[in-house]
Image: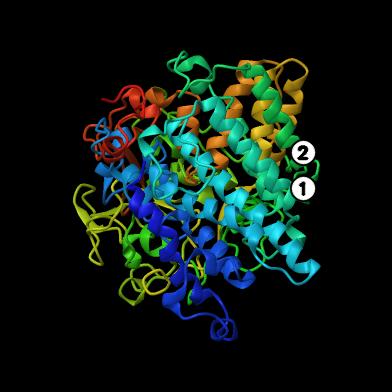
């Protein structure tokens, strides 16, 4: 467990912080700051509300609800992207993870999924233990208290769901700690008990919360609690915790019920959201069959529709179920344009997509992208003359791809925003330059692209693998100078449809077509044609592909590659795509697998995080996860 003295003092520290969230009039009517304690907070409805607000803020543990919008993102712990600044922090794919060194999984960078969540769980428990004692004057006050209890149950369930998906069975704490409590008697619960506890909190939240029309945006809703329930039930159907990894260990593998029962429960939870039982949600854009002939203009319309989900400001659309709002001046702040944007824009170039996943994005007609289409057997080189490229533009690997590719990846030649003054003369169109412009001899570099590591603008922050991440960057934000204001969408309707599709496909039989119908809604919205099959294995392959592309770089892959136990298949060294633009108009794309830009190693113990050594030293009775000493 965490240092208990710190945890016991954590809520009291929040009391000073919550004063900043109350109005001037409210503060003038309250006690002096040094007179506040837990009893004082729960003598006043406004202070109790402010206290709950800080519980929201500390979902990210450190008074910052960025969740997935970090400088180093969770997708960097997968096959999807490369962190160029701190790759060693991703200990799970470096073969270095241990209780003594967790890297990002043991510090503030990924603290919203780490053992440190117990600090916020402590705060929520204090709230739930005291909220019924708050004096009320009207029926509206009483209704507000019930709603706030629902919010607190949601926050606690959210924190515990992240703990469970990281560690398996964890220590369940339902009440505030007492000063004289013997923490050496606290033990981890089984994964069965942990799931039951989370589901109970979700159910209580769903019963107490209004739908999204009855509460301010950003707070928990009935739909948010339902989406959390759907997510944790879907996670619980995975191979990992259903006998795939230490089947007899109750901390990491279910000992009761069956996987079929869990699939049925996951299906029902997602279906309730799809049916509108918790508020109205829908995919952004059309789910009608796309035209058979996709023009370039139409591809970009679908791409913009998808891209705009992640640049939302102000009121969210109906796909967003719950997330985090960001403002320039107040509230939660983030600056992903600066962190992730190309170095030729004076940004930091982090989290570039890796070539293997770039190749997974389909062609616009829904057929697979095939790198060696024009030269079978050569997976490394594409080289064509200007005439050949004019005859068939799709010889360029970035032409004719599906809309989500153009919404998610910044590749060489991709249209982006206007250049700053020092690059505008060289790139007046604002197109990403990760390639090299070659001299007439076709060998020497005449001009490195502005977004390479040889750029004259900046070089320390250029891509190492040849790409930049576009999703969640905002073209209206100049990252060199300003914070982002677009929201982080933690739960969106597409995830619910994918959870439903998986449950149906895994159940098989008459459920298979239901799963494909849900899958095809996601595909059609993306401008892709239906999948049709009666083969369960094929449907599973298509589903897993669709999930990675739809939720690319959102962090979901870290959970899925563990849930499906495929990490040993997908984690591999990272290599660079090198692009040459010759003066005669010919081009060459060379995937250089001779020299890794990031060496990676997968060990199966990384399917679960270890409890940090400091925590084990404080509570040695806790059982460590398998594979760690």
Q: Position of residue 138 (x, y in %)?
A: 78, 71
Residue at 45% across, 54% down = 60
Query: Above or below — where is 178 with respect to 383?
Result: below
Residue 457: image location, x then y, percent: 26, 67
Residue 139 is tagged as none
Q: Which residue is mark 1?
A: 278
109 left or right of 488 in image: left
Mark 2–mark 1 CB contact (< 8 Å): yes
- C-alpha span from label 2 to label 1: 7 Å
Question: Where does the image place residue 49, in percent across and percent down from the top left?
Answer: 60, 66
- Residue 470 lies, with reference to residue 400, above or below; the image says below
Q: Secondary structure at mark 2?
A: helix
273 vs 32, left or right, is right
> How would you rate the neighbour count of disc 2 (Cα within 10 Å): few for under 14, some for 14-19, many for 20 or more?
some
Q: Residue furthest front?
A: 180
The structure residue drawn at horizontal position 51% and vertical position 27%, both measured from the top left corner, is: 191
The total of numbered circles placed on residues is 2
Measured as percent of width and height from the top left, residue 371 is found at 44, 32
The answer to whether any part of residue 351 appears in the image is no
Q: Quarter of the image for the C terminus: give it.
A: top left
Asked whether, in this view, residue 222 is left or right of residue 414, the answer is right
Mark seen at residue 272: 2
Q: Residue at x 72, y 55 (%)?
A: 318
């Amino acid at each position: 467990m965490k240092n208990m003295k710190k945890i016991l003092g954590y809520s009291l520290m929040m009391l000073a912080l919550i004063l900043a969230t109350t109005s001037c009039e409210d503060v003038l009517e309250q006690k002096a700051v040094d007179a506040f304690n837990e009893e004082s907070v729960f003598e006043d409805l406004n202070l109790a509300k402010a206290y709950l607000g800080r519980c929201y803020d500390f979902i990210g543990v450190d008074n910052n609800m960025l969740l997935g919008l970090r400088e180093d993102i969770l997708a960097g712990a997968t096959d999807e992207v490369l962190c160029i600044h701190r790759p060693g922090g991703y200990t799970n794919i470096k073969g270095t993870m241990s209780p003594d060194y967790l890297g990002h999984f043991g510090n503030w960078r990924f603290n919203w999924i780490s053992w440190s969540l117990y600090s916020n769980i402590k705060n929520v428990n204090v709230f739930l233990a005291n909220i019924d004692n708050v004096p009320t004057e009207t029926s509206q006050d009483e209704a507000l208290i019930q709603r706030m209890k629902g919010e607190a149950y949601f926050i606690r369930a959210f924190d515990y769901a992240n703990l469970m998906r990281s560690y398996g069975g964890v220590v369940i704490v339902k009440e505030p700690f007492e000063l004289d409590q013997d923490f050496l008697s606290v033990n981890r619960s089984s994964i069965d008990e942990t799931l039951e506890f989370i589901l109970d909190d979700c159910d209580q939240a769903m019963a107490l919360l209004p739908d999204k029309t009855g509460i301010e945006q950003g707070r928990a809703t009935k739909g948010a609690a339902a989406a959390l329930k759907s997510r944790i039930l879907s996670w619980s159907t995975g191979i990992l915790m259903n006998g795939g990894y230490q089947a007899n260990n109750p901390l990491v593998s279910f000992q009761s019920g069956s996987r079929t029962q869990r699939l049925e429960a996951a299906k029902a939870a997602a279906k309730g959201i799809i049916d509108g039982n918790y508020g109205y949600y829908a995919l952004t854009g059309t789910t009608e069959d796309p035209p058979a002939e996709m023009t370039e203009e139409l591809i970009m319309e679908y791409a913009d529709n998808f891209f705009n989900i992640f640049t939302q400001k102000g009121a969210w659309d109906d796909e967003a179920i719950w997330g985090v709002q960001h403002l320039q001046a107040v509230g939660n702040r983030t600056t992903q344009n600066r962190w992730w944007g190309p170095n030729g824009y004076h940004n930091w170039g982090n989290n570039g997509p890796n070539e293997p996943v770039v190749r997974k994005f389909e062609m616009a007609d829904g057929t697979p992208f095939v790198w060696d289409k024009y030269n079978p057997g050569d997976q490394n080189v594409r080289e064509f003359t200007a005439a050949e490229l004019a005859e068939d533009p799709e010889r360029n690997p970035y032409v004719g791809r599906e809309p989500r590719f153009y919404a998610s990846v910044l590749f060489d030649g991709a249209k982006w925003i206007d250049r700053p003054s020092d690059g505008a003369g060289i790139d007046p169109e604002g197109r990403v330059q990760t390639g090299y412009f070659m001299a007439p001899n076709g060998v020497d570099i005449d001009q490195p692209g502005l977004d390479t590591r040889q750029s004259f603008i900046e070089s320390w922050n250029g891509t190492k693998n040849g790409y930049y991440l576009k999703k969640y960057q905002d073209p209206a934000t100049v990252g060199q100078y300003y914070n982002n204001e677009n929201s982080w969408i933690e739960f969106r309707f597409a995830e619910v449809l994918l959870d439903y599709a998986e449950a149906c496909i895994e159940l098989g039989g008459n459920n298979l077509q239901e799963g494909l119908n849900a899958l095809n809604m996601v595909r059609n919205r993306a401008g892709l044609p239906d999948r049709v099959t009666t083969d369960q294995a094929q449907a599973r392959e298509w589903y897993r592909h669709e999930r990675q592309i739809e939720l690319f770089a959102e962090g979901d892959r870290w959970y899925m590659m563990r849930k499906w136990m495929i990490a040993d298949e997908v984690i591999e060294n990272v290599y660079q795509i090198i692009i040459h633009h010759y003066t005669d108009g010919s081009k060459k794309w060379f995937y250089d697998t001779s020299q890794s830009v990031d060496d990676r190693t997968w060990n199966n113990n990384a399917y679960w995080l270890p409890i940090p050594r400091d925590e084990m030293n404080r509570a040695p009775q806790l059982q460590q996860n398998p594979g760690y000493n």
